[in-house]
Amino acid sequence: MKKMLLLLTALTLTCLASAQMVSPANFKAQLKTNGTAEGEIVFDGKILPGWHVYSTNMNGAGPIEASFAPVKLDGVETVGGLKARGNEIKKFDPVFQAETRYFENSVQFVQKVRFTKPQYAIDCVLEYGGCNDTECSAPQEVAFKQNGKSPAVAGAEAEKEDPKDAAQDTEQAEEAPAEAADSAAVAVDAAERNLWWQPVKAAQLSGTDADDAGKKSLWYIFLTGFLGGLLALFTPCVWPIIPMTVSFFLKRTKERGKAIGDAITYGISIIVIYLGLGLLVTALFGPDTLNAMSTNVWFNLFLFALLVIFALSFFGWFEIRLPSSWGNKMDQKASNTTGLLSIFLMAFTLALVSFSCTAPIVGLLLVQSVTSGEWLSPAIGMLGFAVALALPFTLFALFPSWLKQAPKSGAWMNIIKVSLGFIELAFALKFFSVADLAYGWRLLDREVFLSLWIVIFGLLGLYLIGKLVFPSDGTDGKSRVMPVPCIMFGMLSLAFAVYMIPGLWGAPCKAVSAFAPPMWTQDFNLDKQEVHAAYNDYDQGMAAARQSGKPVFVDFSGFGCVNCRKMEAAVWTNKEVARMLQDDYVLITLFVDDKNLLPEPEEVEFNGEKRTLRTVGQKWSYLQAHKFGANTQPFYVLLDNDGHLLAPPYSYNENADKYIAFLKSGLKAYSGK
C-alpha cells in the first residue's frame, strides 16, 4: 500500500512539475581544507520560500533524498557518506506513510574527502529533491569540479592506524561478497578488450532483417494513425460537422460533378494539413534527434504529463481550445475567397474548430511515432489519421443517401471521448516507466504498473456498462442504460483487467509485455521461466565466455524499448529459445539508456569527433554504433571469443522458429572454428 501511495503521489507531482522547470534551492559548492590530508566538499544551499529540500539516507521513505555521486576522483577519496547540516525537520507524511526529514530556508550537504596524491582532481555531483505544499521538483543536480595541489597527503596518518581498525578491515575484506571473487575470476585483459571492441566489417552485417522490421513498423504506424482518425470522426467536435459540410458542397452548385469535386478537394486539403504537421515534426527534429528523444528521460516525463492532461480533458475536467477568434477569422476568409483556396481554408477551419477533440488523439499519435525511432513515423502517422478523417466527407458527397443512414449526433459521442481518456491515461504510464527505469527510481515496478492498468481498464469497463458516470454524461450522477455495443466493449475491458491480475504474481501477460516494465522489476514472482542475462557488462561477459568456452549472445536493449519487451515475452519464453540462451551461450544484456554514471568518464573518438562517455548507457550505445554500425534496439549479435560475428545480426521479428534458426547458425559457426 505504501508503494502504491508513493507512486500515485509521485506521478501527480511529476505531472505538475514537468509543466514548468523549477529549482527549489540555489546551491554554491566549495572545497574546504585545513592544511591536512582531509577536507570537505560543502554544498551550501538557500531554499526558496515555501519549499523544503529532503535530507540524506531516508531509505526510500518519501521523495528523492540528497545523494553524492562522484564522476571522477583522482588523488582524492571519499570518507564516509554525505552528511546534512542545518535545522532538520522530522515529520510523519501520511501520503508516504513514513517519517520524512527535510530542511527549510537553508541547508548544507557535506562530503568528507581524503587526499591520496600530491595533485588532485575532483568532478562530482550532488543530487537532491524538493517539494512545496502542492508540487515537487524533478531531481536536481549541483555539479562541482576542481583540481590543484593537495595541502597534505594521507600516509603518515595511515601508518598510525589503530591495530584494531586494521584487524577489522581485514575481517571485512574476508567477508567481501562473492561478486568480487567473480570479478577477479573474469579479469579483463587490455589486449583482449581491444580485440573485442574492433569494428565488424560491413559485409558481415548483411542479412539482418532490420529493414523488414522497419517497413512493418511504418505500416503499423500508418494503421494506428488511420484508427486514430476514425476515432476522431466520432467525437462531438467532428461528427456533427460532416452532414453540414457535405450539404454545403451539394447546394453550392447545381452541377453534381463539381460538388463531388469540391468535396474531394476538401478531403485532400485535410490530408495536406495533417500530413504537413507530420512533415514539420520530421523536418524539425530529423532522424538522429527522434531516435535520441525516444530514450530521453525528461522528454518521456514531458510526454507523460502531456498525456495525463489530455486524459483529464477527455474526462471533461476542462477543454483544450484554441482562441475562438482564430476559427472565426479563418471562416470569414473562406467565405470571402473562391476556388481551391476557399476550400482549403474551410478544411483549415475544421482543424481549428475540432482542435479540442482531435488534439489529444493527434498528440498521442505523434508521441507514439516520435518514440518509435523511425524518422518518417510522424509523417506516416499523420497521413493515416488524415486519410481516415477525410474519407467520410468524400464518400458522403459521392453517395448522399448514406447520410440518412448515418447515426445521429448524441450521447454516444461523449462515451467515445471519455473512453479515449482512459486509454490516454494508460499510455501515459508507459512514458513515466521509461524515466523510472533509466534512473532506477523503482516507483513503477512491474506489479505496480499492472495494478494501475487493472484499475484503469476496470473503471473503463464499469463506465461502458453504465456503472460509472462522469459529469459530462449529463445524467446527474445516475447510472444509465448503455447500448449493446458499449456493454460488449465494457465486458472486454473488464476481461482484460482480469487477464492482467495473474501478472501481479509473475504471469507473462504477453498482451501487455510491450508496455509493462521488464520482469526483473517484479518484487514477487512465481514464474521461473523468464530468461535473465548473466552479465550486464560487455567486457566481463566476453571474459567469462572465453573461460567457459561458449559463444556470446549480446542483447542491445533499452528500458524504453517496446519491441525489446515484446521479443522477451513472445520469443524468449519459448522453451527451446530459453534453453539455448541459458545453456549454449553466455548472455549479455546492454541497456543503451542506462543513466548510471561510469566509475570514470571515458574519452572516445567516433566519426572523427571526440566524445566523453559519462553514463553506462552512453558506453553501450557507443559500442553498438562503433562496432556494429547500428543504433536501434532490439539488436542481437552472436560473437565468438575474439569478438567476431558468427551470424548476421538479428532485429525485431517475433517468429520463434526464425530465432531458433538464428541461434543454431551461431552455434554451428562457433563449432566450426
Image (cartoon, grey):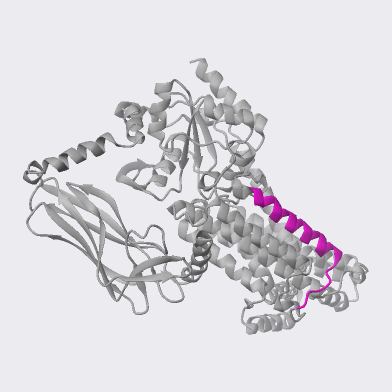
Looking at the image, residue 153 lies above or below residue 274: above
Q: Is residue 522 left or right of residue 170?
A: right
Quarter residue 548 falls in: top left
The picture places residue 55, in percent across and down from the top left corner, at 32, 65
**Residue ID at (42%, 38%):** 623
Q: Residue furthest top?
A: 672
* Residue 137 located left or right of residue 71: right
Secondary structure mostly seen in magenta is: helix
Of residue 443 and residue 267, the one placed in the foreground of this image is 443
Tell me, yes or no, if residue 239 can be seen here: no
The image position of residue 509, as x and y in percent, is: 65, 46
Q: Residue at x 26, y 70 (%)?
A: 107
Nearest the eye: 345 or 183: 183
Q: Is residue 360 visible?
A: yes
Q: Is residue 245 left or right of residue 639?
A: right
Q: Residue drawn at (72%, 78%), measured in percent from left and top?
A: 472
The residue depicted at 44 percent of the width and 55 percent of the height is 441
Q: Position of residue 319 (x, y in %)?
A: 64, 77
Asked if the stretch drawn in magenta spans residue 483, the answer is yes
Residue 652: say if magenta. no
Residue 549 rendering spot, x and y as whole percentages: 44, 20
Nearest to the observer: residue 295 or residue 199: 295
Report the side of 111 relative to 555 (left or right): left
- In the picture, residue 29 is in which quadrant? bottom left
Q: Which residues are magenta?
A: 478-502
